[in-house]
Amino acid sequence: MACGLATLAVIEDESLVENAARMGDLLLSKLEELKQRHSVIKEIRGKGLILAVEFHEPKEMTLKLGWKALHKMETNLFTQMIVSSLLSRHRILTQVAAHGLDTLKILPPLMITPVEVDKFVTALDSVLRDCRKFPGPLWDLGANFLRQSLRKPASVA
């Protein structure tokens, strides 16, 4: 009970619920701005600091080809590519919302600051811009699959 009471005291003393509401609104508005620059973003939704970015087939031809190729292999590989790129290039941990969904789940900590919100939005913008390039995250993901498929299986004794 002491741990629970201490946790509740920190949540109240540091106004974490209010911060979550403010930072969630800030993140939501910045992601909406990002949606205007990237046709692959279908919808931004969330409440507080529980947010999701849903993707759909983009309008740009190069990105559309990559989208279709990834969806032929597995329906949520595009979003997995975004998750992988955010982690490997920017050290930001996100998740695919569920199997078969083109939705990125964002669950930042309650004490996130505006600086960290900006860092996340800038990183996501960078990853989405890189998706249009060759080579880019799409090709990194494909090369990684190829490397894994060419590895010799460990011999069974």
Image (tube, grey):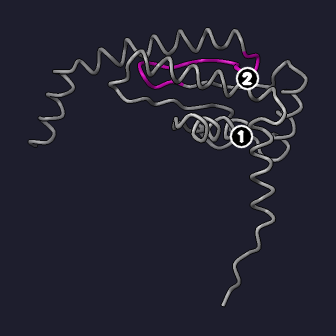
The image position of residue 70, as x and y in percent, is: 81, 41
Task: Left or right? Give the position of 2 relative to 98.
Answer: left
Q: Residue at x 63, y 31 (%)?
A: 103
Q: Quadrant of the C terminus?
A: bottom right
Instruction: Verify whether residue 35 appears in magenta.
Output: no
The image position of residue 125, as x and y in percent, is: 65, 21
The image position of residue 62, as x and y in percent, is: 88, 27
Please name whichever residue, 22 or 137, is drawn nearer the observer in this view of the structure: 137
Name the residue tied to disc 2.
129
Mark whose residue sits in front, 2 or 1: 2
Disc 2: CA contacts within 10 A as few (<14), some (14-19) or many (>=20): some
Q: Residue at x 37, y 30 (%)?
A: 109
Task: Left or right? Give the position of 8 relative to 151.
Answer: left
User: Between marks 2 and 1, how big is the CA–CA gap?
Assistant: 19 Å
Kindly identify the amino acid type of the residue bearing the numbered disc 2: Arg
Q: Quadrant of the N terminus?
A: top left
- Helix, strand or loop at label 1? It is loop
Q: Which mark is residue 61?
A: none
Say above or below: 155 vs 96: below
Q: Which residues are magenta?
A: 38-51
Q: Residue at x 85, y 43 (%)?
A: 72
Q: Quadrant of residue 2?
A: top left
Name the residue tied to disc 1.
76
Disc 1: CA contacts within 10 A as few (<14), some (14-19) or many (>=20): many
Instruction: Verify whether residue 45 appears in magenta.
Output: yes
Say above or below: 15 vs 138: above
Task: Left or right? Give the position of 10 relative to 69.
Answer: left
The image position of residue 64, as x and y in percent, is: 86, 27
Mark before the other along the chain sequence, 2 or 1: 1
